[in-house]
Image (tube, rainbow, N blue to C red):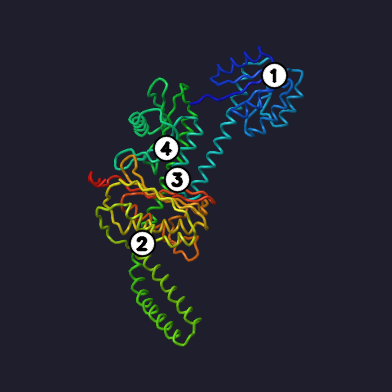
Amino acid sequence: MTPARVLVVDDDPHILEVLAMRLESLGLDVSAAASPGDVPGILADRSFDLALFDLRMAPLDGLALLDIARKQHPHLPVLIMTAHGSIDGAVEAIRRGAFDYLTKPFVPEELRGKVTRALAERRWARDRALLAKLGTSLASGDSVDGVLGVVVQTTLDATATQRAAVFLRERGELVLRAAAGTPVVSDAELIAAAEAAMNGGDPTSVTVEPDRIVLAAPLRVEGRIRGVLTAETTQTVVPTSDDLSLLALFASHAAIAFRSSHDLEGARSGALAALGRVAAQVAHEINNPLGGLKIYAMLVGKRLATHGDRHGVDLAGKIGQAVDRLAALVSDITAYGRPAELRLEPTDPEEIVQECLALVQDKIEERRIDVACELDGSLGLLMLDAREIHKALMNVLVNAVEAMDAGGQLGVRTAREPDGGVRIKVSDTGCGMDTPTLGRTYDLFFTTKTGGTGLGMAIVRSAVERHGGRVEIATEHGRGTTVELVIPPSSVTPLPAEAS
């Protein structure tokens, strides 16, 4: 764990030296400054967990430095150092936002106690903010991968370690689901530490090498351990029970996300089964009348045309268009509720990309959208159902194009994953999504588009997941969205050497 960073400012070099030594003996990372005029620049360049300012200095006294510190770092606790004869000034400092004051000469117990309390308050304020961020992510209905991403990032911020990761037990093996930071131990060492935490059932720290430590906390879901949250550090500071408790707290959020995901998946499966039962009946009861309406609209349009009734012809055409939209909705419901069995054949995914781009070319030209297409060119053949992936990619491309105004930019890129899988990436510079909308991306019949069916993204995920893949979404409200279709390596068949 990284030692807390403390800034000490006193224009008396002897006091500054002694105080710095005492604070370092408490395991703190101390930055000492004898010139108060240097402090604004120091605070601008670095972040600290605590500051100690002498009250009487020139040209800037402790109160002036307090005001500067609170402006640049509103949550930085400040201790004001003062002699016995200037208590009034210390009281004024507390009124203006100082955490507390220390009297000279320093009493070791008082120094240790107030420094410890100030650092604890700082950490608690930071952890409250991080937990609030996690709670917001859970409440927003974000995907399990989205919540796990927030968990590892907040764990990294809270523990000041070099890397945080979440592993879940899948098919008997620990699988990395989210990570943030730079690894400092090997994969084998990290998994061994994770296994130790899962086997022990409690948060633990494992010393991999003298200067490398792994903290690990198991993820308990309904009484069973389903995974583990880890944090890696190169520091020689021994983790405290508070550090492990904090890690366990973040692990509990990861476990909640995991459980919520499975609950949602169960509900989705039930809804899908019910939708499948209804779909066939809907198709039977509606398709035949719709076909008749379509024919009648065409006949009426032709008869009105012979009489020169252009307005009537337009109305008949609109009736036909409405019938087409209803037929498309029925088709989507049927396709999603009872998807056909996959017909897997060796297929070049980049051919599908080119076909889909050609089909949305009219929309692209109509909106004057710039397209940047980067195809890998050597992905190989995938054993997939071209119809399903084509349908999924078309939904993604149409959403991207319709999300943009004139002059937008559409990016389409294919790439091979490090593990051999294939990634199809579609990005736009459109309206993007806010957090609540992102949380409902796959909800049946939820749409923000006029005339939308609310089935598009549900169909996308269904098609990709049936191939063993996943859909990843990154979005920023007002800035755009990126949707990535990831096909696992087990679906890849390499191209012959002469073909690639």
Q: Nearer the viewer, residue 128 or 336?
A: 336
Q: Which element is circle 2 on?
A: helix
Figure quadrant of residue 417: top left
User: Which residue corresponds to mark 4?
Assistant: 179
Q: Is residue 324 above or below residue 253?
A: below
User: Which residue corresponds to mark 3?
Assistant: 146
The three-letter code of the residue at mark 4 reads Ala
User: Which residue corresponds to mark 1?
Assistant: 103
Q: Does the residue at mark 3 contact the one at mark 4 (Cβ under 8 Å)?
A: no
Mark 3, mark 1: which one is toward the viewer? 3
The three-letter code of the residue at mark 3 reads Gly
Assess disc 4: are there few (<14), some (14-19) or many (≥20) residues with their C-alpha within 10 Å of its C-alpha.
many
Q: Earlier in the sequence, mark 3 or mark 1?
A: 1
Q: Which element is circle 1 on?
A: strand
Q: Which element is circle 3 on?
A: helix
Q: CA distance from mark 3 to mark 4?
A: 11 Å
Q: Is residue 97 above or below residue 340?
A: above
Q: CA distance from mark 3 to mark 1?
A: 49 Å
What is the count of numbered marks? 4
Q: Which element is circle 4 on?
A: strand
Say left or right for 32 vs 63: left
Figure quadrant of residue 444: bottom left
Image coordinates for residue 33, horizontal then vertical, percent: 64, 19
Image coordinates for residue 266, horizontal then vertical, percent: 37, 54
Q: Earlier in the sequence, mark 3 or mark 4?
A: 3
Say left or right for 383 vs 460: left
Q: CA distance from mark 1 to mark 4?
A: 46 Å
Q: Earlier in the sequence, mark 2 or mark 4?
A: 4
User: Which residue corresponds to mark 2?
Assistant: 336
Assess disc 1: are there few (<14), some (14-19) or many (≥20) residues with their C-alpha within 10 Å of its C-alpha.
some
